[in-house]
Amino acid sequence: MQDIQSPDWRDDVIQDFARSELFERTFQEGMELVEETASYLDGEGRQESKLLSRNAALAYAAESMRLTTRLMQVASWLLVQRAVREGDMAPASASEDRYRLNGEEVSRETDAARGELPRGLTGLADRAERLYERVRHLDKRMYLESQTAEPSNPVLGQMDRLKSAFGG
């Protein structure tokens, strides 16, 4: 059983996630949402934005900027995890702050301004926000909680404590 304080334990958590079906699904969803958003903003969204009032057009610009920022943060994080999976990056490197999600909140448009925005944009923004929150949760679990948390299996954690207590 591995010592939860050892870097190897954390490396294993990171590598296990990178090889998991959850990662594969999240990666696929993230990349598809990036492509869908780019297509929308370059096509239908551009046409819809031309029909908006001045205030709504400003809100559209702010919301699309927030949306693309969130998606690029998620895509970057997912690409780092894929690099770990493929052996192109060490798990310890992936845990550096520069590869982690930015914990800062990005403010959303007010409900009044959001009501004037095209549904295509608000729908993409809502999906991106949900994906970002899921990825942020994964990031926190893998990189923050794994530094001090017990192993995910409570029985193994108890066995480790018993071994320590009885010199095993």
Image: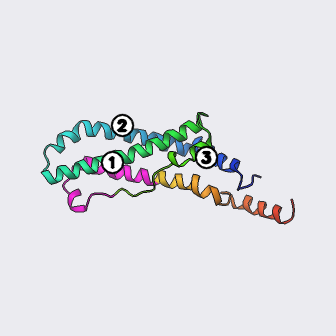
**Closer to viewer: mark 2 or mark 1:** 1
Q: Left of 6 or right of it: where is 36?
A: left
Q: Percent position (x, y) of residue 22? A: 54, 46
Q: Residue at x 31, y 38 (%)?
A: 38
- Marks 2 and 1 sit apart, C-alpha to C-alpha, by 13 Å
Residue 29 visible: no
State if disc 1 and disc 2 touch (CB < 8 Å).
no
The reply, left or right, for residue 65 in relation to residue 32 is left
Does the segment drawn in magenta span residue 127? yes
Q: Which class describes the residues within 10 Å of circle 2: few (<14), some (14-19), or many (20+)?
A: few
Query: In the drawing, what numbered circle is on residue 14?
Result: 3
Q: Please state which amino acid type lies under the numbered disc 3.
A: Ile
Image quadrant where one finds the C terminus: bottom right
Q: Position of residue 163 (x, y in %)?
A: 82, 61
Provide the residue span drawn in magenta. Answer: 107-133
Pointer 2 residue? 35
The numbered mark at residue 158 is none
Total numbered circles: 3
Residue 167 forms part of the magenta stretch: no
Query: How far is the residue under mark 1 from the one under mark 3?
Result: 27 Å
What kind of residue is marked 2? Glu
Q: Which mark is residue 67?
A: 1
Q: Earlier in the sequence, mark 2 or mark 3?
A: 3
In the displayed structure image, the side of residue 116 where residue 30 appears, left or right: right
Q: Position of residue 132 (x, y in %)?
A: 43, 51
